[in-house]
Amino acid sequence: MPATPTGRTTDDARAATATGLVPCRIVVCRDCCCGSPKVTGVDHTAQTERLRAAAPVRVSDCLDVCDQANVIVVQPSTEGRAAGARPVWLGLVNDPDATEDIAAWVRAGGPGVAPRPDILDLYTFTPPGRRATR
């Protein structure tokens, strides 16, 4: 069986979806500022692919927090949501080490399942209109 980015086999992933279980997911902003030449020195394609190796990734249009480019949102799995986790917004993710830290956290289970590495606190922000959570 081929393995999914989360390490599950394709059949395991289908079974999880059929039972309503959703894995940790990642949203990357790739519009006007994020993912563009405005943010220099970042291989945006490589960043997206590194994250895709850890979990399903959705590429989004502008998330309206351009001052935080590059923005990545880590969405909790079904298990994480059951534990009370909410999506974690990360901004200024402009170096490969930060991308690797995010990927490792997601592979470990992400919000509500695995503790967020302290280093990611440097990137965490609360987008306008939302309440801060830890």
Image (spheres, rainbow, N blue to C red):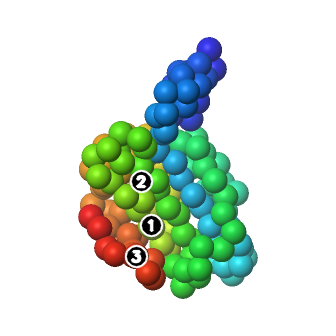
Distance from the alpha carbon under mark 3 to that under mark 1: 11 Å
Question: Which residue type does callout 3 highlight?
Answer: Arg
Within-10-Å neighbours for mark 3: few <14, some 14–19, many 20+: few
User: Which quadrant holds the C terminus?
Assistant: bottom left
* Res 3 → quadrant: top right
Percent x, y of residue 46: 66, 54
Nearer the viewer's eye, disc 3 or disc 1? 3
Decide if residue 46 is on the left or right side of residue 81. Answer: right
The residue indicated by pointer 1 is 89
The residue indicated by pointer 3 is 130
Within-10-Å neighbours for mark 1: few <14, some 14–19, many 20+: some
Kindly tell me whether residue 11 is visible in this rendering: yes
Question: Which residue type does callout 1 highlight?
Answer: Trp
* Residue positioned 54% across, 69% down in the render: 71
The residue indicated by pointer 2 is 101
- Helix, strand or loop at label 3? It is loop
- Helix, strand or loop at label 2? It is helix
The first of marks 2 and 3 along the sequence is 2
Nearer the viewer's eye, disc 2 or disc 3? 3
* Residue positioned 50% across, 74% down in the render: 92
Count of all numbered marks drawn on residues in the image = 3
